Amino acid sequence: MQSMLQKVWVVVVAVLLLSVSAGCVKPPTVKLHDIDVVGIDFRKIDLVFALKVTNPNNFQLDFSSLTYGLASDGTEIVKGALASPVMSLSANETTIVRAPISLEYAALAPMLRNIRAGETIPYQFSTAAEFLFLDLLKIPVHLKRSGRMPALRKPAWHFRDVRLVKGPPSWLELSFEVENPNIFELPLEKLSGVLKYGNEIILRIDEPNLKPIPPGKTAMFTIRTRADGSGVTKAFARSIISRRRQRFAFEGSLRVGVPKLLRKMLLEELPKDD
């Protein structure tokens, strides 16, 4: 009985394979459609590669898996996979599937050692997709596209100084430095955090009005805020009691906006659909 079932399955699979070879089942197509910049910070840049997936058949196919990766000159930068199964594709359906990729500056650094500012580096984006017909026949589809992208370098920011601006009222002026080694403007969205003197919090910062940093520049910006009288008095009193000079320190985050020019650069180099 088991032998008979095995023979039946062999016949079914053979019929399915014959259907594919005869053109009854057409392989789906996967094309690189768009690249979007969805986030950037001082550690990585988050991109989304949009794929246009088409089922050319008059019946449903199951999009079972998708793995993808980004490389440069044969060196793998990052890879990922979508949760399986991805989705079902109706007859003659075309849909957009998004593959998120995070490019860490540390992973890009070895490729940029001999690249000058303003130059671009080659990239190869590849995918391996698998579709199912009647839960039996696996249809593999591969995509490889090459392009060029800007040499993405790690920006940095530092807390530099704090000084008292005499009043009344009294204000504290905090100075920060931002390094932008890239060929695109770096928009700054928000600075938030606390200024400490030793272990005591002097004041809290929540500043959304920041100017962008020009390409290839290191720029300073200052934040002026009213000093918390009780906090300052308490901090200095503890310093006097302990007879130890304390240091000012800033603990917080600087949020970066999405550079519009970077997205434009990536789209200019985006290979067109075949």
Image (tube, helix red, strand yellow):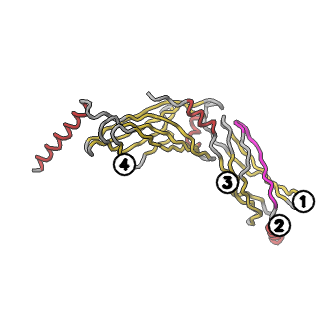
In this picture, residue 202 sits left or right of residue 88: right
Is residue 141 among the parts visible in the rendering?
Answer: yes
SS at circle 3:
strand
- Mark 4 or 3: the one toward you: 4
Location of residue 128 in the rendering, given as x and y in whole percent from the top left corner: 39, 38
**Magenta stretch: includes residue 154:** no
Q: Residue furthest top?
A: 274
Q: Which mark is residue 229?
A: 2
Cα–Cα gap, marks 1 and 2: 12 Å
Cα–Cα gap, marks 2 and 4: 59 Å
SS at circle 1:
loop
- Mark 3 or 1: the one toward you: 1
Split into 4 quadrants, where in the image is the C terminus? top left
Determine which quarter of the picture holds residue 166: bottom right
Asked whether the beta carbons under mark 4 and mark 3 sit within 8 Å of each other, the answer is no
Residue at which label 1 appears: 167
Location of residue 177 in the rendering, given as x and y in whole percent from the top left corner: 74, 46
Q: Earlier in the sequence, mark 1 or mark 2?
A: 1
Q: Residue furthest bottom?
A: 241
SS at circle 2:
helix
Residue at which label 3 appears: 253
Magenta: main secondary structure: strand
Residue at which label 4 appears: 85
Residue name at image x 59 percent, y 30 percent: 120
Identify the amino acid type marked 3: Ser
Q: Earlier in the sequence, mark 2 or mark 4?
A: 4
Residue name at image x 45 percent, y 40 percent: 96
Closer to the camera in the image, 120 or 199: 120
Identify the amino acid type marked 4: Pro
